[in-house]
Image (cartoon, rainbow, N blue to C red):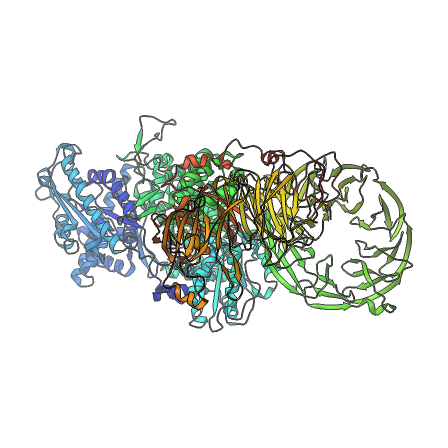
Amino acid sequence: MVEIQSDLVRSVLTGQINVEDLPEPPSKVIKIFLCCNATDMKHERNVLVQRVYPNIREHCREKHGLDLQIVDLQWGVKDVYQDDHSHQKDVLNEIRRCQRLSPGPCFMALLGQRYGYRPLPASIPGNEYELIRSMVQKHRTRDTRDSELLDEWYIKDSNAVPPTYVLQPISRLIPEYKTNPEAQQEWEETHFKLRRFLQKGSHLCFMDGTMNASTKHKYHMSGVEEEIQQGIMGCSDAENRCLVFIRTIEDLKNYVTDPKTPEFMEVSFNEKEEKLEIDGESEQFLNDLKHKHIPSKVPRNHMIKSTVLWRYDNVINADFHKPYLDELCLKMSELMTRLVDNAARTHVVQESLPIYNEALEHWYVAKRKSENFYGRDEILGGVHTYLRGAADKPMVIHGEAGSGKTSVVAKVMTEVRNWLPHNSIVITRFLGINSDAADLRLVIHGICQQIALALGNDLADIPDEYKALHRYFLEQLQTIPVDRHLAIFFDAPENLTPDYHAHYMQWLPEHLSDHVKIIVSTRPGAHNILQRLKTEVIKNSSYFIEVPALSVTASADLLSYWLSLRGRRISVEQEIVVREAFSLCSLPLYARLVLEEASTWKSYTRSIRNITAKDVPTYIEKLFDFLERKHGINLVSKALTYLTASRTGLSETELEDLLSLDDDVMNEVFQSWHPPSRRLPSLPYVRLQNDLDGFLAQKDVDGVTVKFWNHISFEEVAKKRYLSDEAKTKIVYSDLADYFAGIWFNKEKPFQSATKNELDPQKQADRLVASQPLTYKGMDGTTRYNKRKYDQVPRTLYLSGRLQELNKMAFFNYSWIYNNSKALSLQHILSTFALNPSLEASLLTDALQGAQPIIAKNETSMAAEITGRLLSYYAAHPHLRQLIQQCDTDGLPHCAVIPTFPYHQTPGAPLQYTLECNTRMQFFSLMGEDSRYLLAKKQSSQFIKVFDLATGELKQEIFASTGDMHVTPDNSLLVLIDHIAERTIKIHKSDTGEFVGQLVPMNHIQLLPKEKYKIDSISISDYFLCLVITTETSYLFIASVHECRFVQIFALESKSTLCKISPDSRYVFCNCKNVLLSYDLYTLEHIQNIQLEHNPTDMIFTKSGNKAFVVSSKENKIVVLHLKDGCVETSYKIMLQEAMKSDRIIDLRLSHDESNVLIRGLNNLLVYNMKHKRVINRIARPDDVPKQFRLPRSNSAIDLGFAQADFSTDDQYIVGCIFTNVYMWRVTDGELMTSMQSPVGVITTLFVTADRKQVVTHQEDSDIIQVWSLSEAMKYGHVDVLDRLTRPITKILFTGDNAYAFVRCDQSDEVGVVDMCTGQLLDLLTHESLLETLTITSDGHYAFTTVKPRKPNVANKIWHAGERKIIHEFGNAPGYATAMHNESTIICIWQKEINFKAPFYMSRFKCHEEKVQEIPCNVILNFLLRPPFVTGDDKYVIVLTADKYQEHKAWYVNPTVCAFSIEDNFSVASYSPEDLQGSVNIKRILDVRPYGDNPYAVFVFFSNVPDDLNNNERHVSAHYHKTGFMVLDICSGAILKVCDDFLPADMSIEKLLFSNNMKWCVDPDSNIYDITNGVFVKQLDTRGFPPMRFASNGKHVVYYQGQEIFIIRTEDYEEIARVDVHNPISCLEVCDDERTVVVGCTDGSIVSYVLIDHKYDNAAEVISSIPSRQEDQPEDDGRSWDKVESSSDPPNSRPPTALSLSIKDKDRLKQIKPVPRIHPQSDTLLYLSPKSRTCSIM
């Protein structure tokens, strides 16, 4: 049980939180703004870029999982100031961004002796400007005589609120500024004058008292000081987040006249003295910064000070100043590292519940999407009414892309806490915002967790497997307390992956409680989701709310509102332009694009161009055009290309790295000059980012803060614009793959200059990009995974076409898959694999998809899951083989067992679903236009199950009536015929089960006393129900199904067997013996009699009803009738006697195009072509299918023939079933395309769905329905899937070489023979009654079984396993048997009658080929206390017997060990307690066991409690006496070892588990005892689960719990393996090799593993000995229990019991030549090959 400790966590999980109270998302980037002058710190900034920043960046990533971004807007560019004067605004915005985002240092200043450039303010508040201007004009002097220049350059913008005066772009007044040096000089002079006017005016205002000092200083300060004011003085935590470097050139004043000096210090010309001197004002301002302002905020230990001397012409020289630069790098690295580490410790993110982080992420989206929400009151009102009302279905909000659906959902989410009671639970999922939110299973799992935590329920109850999870979710919704309201929002289900059929929306509940509400938002056309919601899920239009486009006025109002939030407005003339645009498109997203443009409009702008974009995509295209013109086509196009191609977004540093690696971008940026490092400068990136930010959303992905498009429309346009060229797109993805793979870290990349077209090998540069290791090691020693690499590399490698690298690195690399699942999730892997359509990748994807719930619960089992599911493909698929080999070795440290043969869950198998009905179904029907729904019903049940074949889920249960089920062709009505007396026909609506009416045929005919009637045939159309009822004669009943009344009854002259309504529902045909009659259903008149040769048994029509085909079971002919108005115009016969020789026609099927007729017989399928008037194909029954078969627990044999056959939907194939298999043949040539094998059973029902490429089958008397995928069957071909037996496994016996296992089931008469190399079920041996015991010889050639007999002398049976037949039967009571180790001999002890007091006889049965020699023992035993066993080397048979039995005490008297010498004709030596008392304190023998392989000794457990104690005394004595053991030499009676105080006396020996070498034992509490020394060793911690078996001679103990096995190493208590066997375990055994663990399950399946402990074993050596790991495996013939070999011999008259195997298998089991048939006395069925001369006698 997980408790919510924090109020914040609880409020987030329950939705009871105000979005304004959400915690700030933890920042993942250290973002530092670098402040300096452009000219005086060039060398310092260069060495920092090259030597410091990369190392600090790696430190941040490695130790703290943080990115580092240095924003230096001066580096790498020559002219930072723009024509529109926006640079300083960009600088200040970037400083604020750094302060907001960086959790650590955010500002770094590099100061020399230059105060810096003083830019003009780009805009001045209106009242401030007017005050300055008035002062300048009022105080006219020589300095202000040109003050009119102010009004020429500063123009009032009334669109600003309040109005401002805007400095005009330079080129507007000086057009040639960008190209003409004289124009540039003119601007310098103008700039000087304008700054002088502003400074003079502000000074006068200050002196006049109308302006304060700080406002005045704004017009005097440099850009650097303004940056420091914002970055340091404006930082609340400057002492921890700011660092300053101050450099002093000591002799700089000596070089005032040097031309280089102005780069390092301001100088001015003193006109009075006519000389250059240091600018005093600049020097004073700079000194105030250095010595007054900065020290007041920045501590001394965050400041670095250096002094240098002027060095020749360069002033600062990289060579001459190397010590200084080295020291700078060292000190700056130390300081930055210290600040980063301190910040990381201070801002460490506390570990919290993953579900809290998930919920919080969606709350952040809601907050962002609901910001600036405006209008939509009617929609909000509708949602409010729904949430507060008693609606019982989900609500759907829908609208086209850009209509604002998501914003509506976000707004509702932020308001709903005010609409619902305070204890309500509000949950939202914005689907697709990350990979977890795109996976339906993870989404539902997260919601279930959130609800459970809110209600205080246990998270452990939530299943991982999807179907179980979905059931839990629906049940959870039903159990919400009535005093708690629950509201769940799902936005954009179209963003879900198609896994689990998410787009069918069947995962939504159809009905809700009054206090539970679900709201879904979607857009039309996306995966047809909206249509499905309307027609299949909700089916009520009142639950749908459309979000329409806005009206023109509403759009204009929305724009005005958004502008007001930015402090903007537009003029009347501009509003006209806007309204014209909104008449083209009035979606909110369109308005958002207009906002970005309109917010730049100034009131004085006279020529606003019309907005001509007709829709959102066109507008986005125009936006991209504008950005490319403004920032450069390569920079913009490549940035947007990489961003879009990344799929999940890129961090700013990732995008900077990628652009730095792109030489098209670099050549565009560095056209006129090149900085020392070839890396993208910050300035062009920041300027582009500022223009893009309004269209990007920030989110956390894989531990990194990334940016991506905030609306799908941008993504779609960007893909079309930048990623439509396949060749160029591959290059883009290849660049991404190289970057995230770390190819260019610490490596120089060649480049070509802008003027050259070829690479110059001499030109290469390190782009200073980040490293990309697989893992990072944090400060605390924890390992973090590079999630970005795991996420991006596989996908980009695939999309770049580099498949070989991809296969090697990721797709078929176990270590990558395992670590990737830990770094991200298995769903990330699956979403990546979905890109690769290759067969092997598809198989691996299916395997991981199926294993996902198991791996989620136990990630260490991944290797076993991959291997077990894919082992079938080991030999044929090299990449899968390579992966399995890696799993076998690299997976052992995670899980020390590997599967030896495939799991039953094999990917690529065509079995799509198994529909569990929990009862045996008898009637089935497909419904829906595409046969999507399957109705299944049991005759005696009133319930009808409706399964969705698209999802494999139970959609609903319809309550109707008992009886046989029929459905009208339009699927609207159910017709149910009473199955008991067949007197009532009830009609119900098919969607709800609502009763419509009933028909009672017996009320309309006169029955004689004791006369019975039956319904012989029924036919139903959309309007009529016609049926033939037979008593002494037959009647044709015609009823209206909608009116539920009989409209006519015709008495027929004789008995009828056929009734068929024509497709147009106008006519009905029935027969009187061999006469076919037609009736008009509208006029109720008899129309015509058609004479036939025999009674018809089937009749089918063409779609038009103009042609009918009639057959009779008595002749192999088809009568073709040409019909018109219910009359036969012409007819002819299709003669099939030759084609159907020795067969008979069962039924007909017409192809969908009506070109072919499929004729089904018992043993043949014929395809008759209507055009060519001939049989074009004859398909005979497969040769290996037996004529008859008796299933386990069946009373009789079943005749096996084609049970069903039909055309596929496209008419290209025939799908048919016989016995256990479904086959697909090509219509044109009859070639077998593939086959599908079902479990043990006989398929009796088969449907081919319309348009779904599915086949539905059902086996007789089964509660399981199989749904097969035809497309999968065709894609992968035949896939052998291991068979299951029919009942839980209770016993598994192995042959001496462990090659075969004989398996016994609970409460069944079957014995399965399993090939331990392949897992295939080779044989199925069935008996006439339930099996009691099973024993086999060590070579596996013979088996001994016992049953409760129905006839004399058949209780015990000896089978010849090689020939699958019983060769000896005897006894009337089941006996006990044991087999000898080295020969085919069985020793049996049995009673001649079933009587407790009857004596026991013993015989040795020597088996040779099909003969049995019985050698009886002349010693008769009174009792048998435990099954006998044979000692090593077949020396002795050991029996524990007793003298007598005291009934009043329920006590055997004097238990005695008897040792019968096998070599000496059963001579016996016996040892009673009395015989042994002289050597040991023994009162009673408790048990006897083999002593390892020692042929002459046994292990005897004894007690020193006397036999003559009563039960009470014995109970008391148990506290004072112990159980001991001895090793007894059975030849001499000598005691070789004794321990008389080993276990408590009350410990049951039967519950002890012994190692095979008898050195160790373990009790049910996992206490381990050393038998050799007779001492307790240790107790294993197994959480109370009892041990099942020892392995490795006591080195390991094997346990199981539910459907998991786990293995503990006894030496160090470590759990070395835990695997899920996929079904509840009922039996577990360890083979004689002490390492093969075989598991039997309750579903009848067998699973096998090999234990390989790296501490003891040579893994390569063990693996090489496993047959399934051999590359050159013989071709697998598949299972053979249900097959016989083709033969010219006559077929068996009785069904075979154990079928002959393939040649390979027969070689293994020693094929024996046919011998004259032997007749067993029992009625056991022997399934034999036709080559055998033996069959059964009933």
Q: Position of residue 780 (x, y in %)?
A: 26, 50
Give residue 1082's position: percent from left, percent from top.
85, 61
In this view, the residue in front, 1394 or 501, is: 1394
Residue 527 is situated, as x and y percent measured from the top left of the image, at 56, 51
Q: Position of residue 1029 (x, y in %)?
A: 83, 61
Q: Left of 1358 or right of it: where is 265?
A: left
Tally of marks: 0
Q: Relative to the observer, which residue lies in front, 1409 or 1532?
A: 1532
Q: Is residue 1689 visible?
A: yes
Q: Quadrant of residue 1181?
A: top right
The quarter of the picture where residue 136 lies is: bottom left
On the picture, is 689 further left or further right than 586?
left
The N terminus: image quadrant: bottom left
Q: Is residue 710 visible?
A: no
Give 1637 or 1528, whichever is nearer the viewer: 1528
Give 1436 or 686, whichever is nearer the viewer: 1436
Q: Is residue 572 above or below residue 898?
A: below
Q: Is residue 1277 left or right of residue 1504?
A: right
Quadrant position of residue 1174: top right
